[in-house]
Image: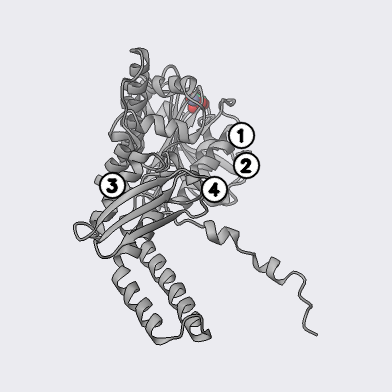
Amino acid sequence: MKMTDLPVVEGMIRLCTDGWQQGWHERNGGNVTYRLSEEETEAARQRLTHLPGAWMPLGESLPEVGGVWFLATGSGKYFRNVALDPEDALCLVEINEAGDSYRLRWGLKNGGRPTSELAAHLLNHSVRYMATGGACRVMYHAHPAHIVALTFLEELTDKTISRALWQSETEAPMVFPGGVGVVGCMVPGSMDLARASAEKMKEYDAVVWAHHGLFTSGPDYDTAFGLMHTVEKAAQVRVLVTNAGGAKQQISDSEIRAIAEGCGVQIREAFLEEGESGEELESLFEKWCRKLRITPQWDVKLELVRDPAWRKTGDFKIDPDDRKAILMLNVANPRQENMEEVIVHELMHIKLYPLDQVCESLIENSFEEDSKAYRFACQTFFEDLEVTVEELTKCFLLEGGRNKAFSYGRCAGRKSFDELYKGLKPIE
Ligand code: 13P
Ligand code: ZN
């Protein structure tokens, strides 16, 4: 059996051919690497026909990939030629135990060296290996025209580019709900580009290289190729629409959330506008009234408070006889808190209102008003009520929240342990 019959080699040949046919690999544009498993390395070892090449410095120390074998495209090799002569265009690279040198074990039969982006690939492999618990095996770099075009049209931030892509095609939030990272225009093949890219790969499985191309990763060739394809398709739609004179409408943030919710993936909420728009809050409010079964027992209404002098984040007015309530939300400073958490918290108070009333009347009827016992009972009851309401809020938010991030507003205002102990005399 030849090396080219191994599934990992066949898979790479197919990816290169498909990428070429998509038009993503002009000349020698783009490169791929695959991290071999122990079994795949053993299978490759048995097909070796040449002595290993000399050890070459990597220019970086990467102990995480020490001793690992990678299949890679060669530098300057044309993707259109990979299928015609894989042994010329591809190579098997062994990394030494220290992770600072490599040597050729197969391929590049007419000479040459692995891709000039090898450092970026290996750094990204180390990072994604950690981020995915060892599942990630493929790094794929290509030059798809529309994603490159998008880096001339949009602000170069992770948020703007990710949101622009999500807004352009419903598939986008489903396939990359975590968004994409973006790095600025940098010298191809440079260590700076490799490091900037790896920094982004800690959080993302795809990184846009401004004015250059896209880097994707995945556990197999299909996933890395599919991610490249989906990001590029969304960018293509964006650019087509821009060319046609601009969008009359686009996929809204609430539609993006609904798509993610519908297919059970966690969208990177920080890239969407927070729910401060009336429409967004109204939809969250209705959702939680239904989920917590507040309606139809209660008639509840949402009121947005736009007075910056109002100190509270949320509160409610209640008429228990008519079972009517108005939930008030502070939208003057909405970014301080997760507004969904505030909505659930306040609705939970309504939910617990009957119990709340029983405890209050028990206290009123058992203790003399303003007595020590009365004040103690009131304080204990209200503190416990708040703790219970917040605990239930967290549980429900984790189960069904669009934004599962807890607000740490009040916590941030507390003194740190260091501050608390500052000024205290040490115990002799
Ligand atoms: P290589 O031919 O060295 O892989 O370079 C192609 C490329 O796309 C550089 O970013
Ligand atoms: Zn490139």
- Are the two marked residues, 3 and 1, in contact with CB atoms closer than 8 angstroms? no
**Which sits earlier in the primary sequence, circle 4 or circle 2?**
2
Q: Residue at x 40, y 80 (%)?
A: 364
| Mark 2 lies on residue | 60
Amino acid type, callout 1: Met
Q: Is residue 76 left or right of residue 363?
A: right
Q: Is residue 245 above or below residue 230?
A: above
**Which sits earlier in the primary sequence, circle 4 or circle 3?**
3
Q: Residue at x 32, y 42 (%)?
A: 257
| Mark 1 lies on residue | 191
* Badge number at residue 27: none
**Within 10 Å of the Cα at label 3, are there few (<14), some (14-19), or many (20+) other Cα atoms?**
some
Q: Secondary structure at mark 4?
A: loop
Q: Secondary structure at mark 2?
A: loop
| Mark 3 lies on residue | 261
**Which sits earlier in the primary sequence, circle 1 or circle 4?**
1
**Within 10 Å of the Cα at label 4, are there few (<14), some (14-19), or many (20+) other Cα atoms?**
few
Amino acid type, callout 3: Glu
Q: Residue at x 37, y 62 (%)?
A: 393
**Within 10 Å of the Cα at label 1, are there few (<14), some (14-19), or many (20+) other Cα atoms?**
some
Residue 306 pos. (x, y %): 46, 43
Amino acid type, callout 4: Ala
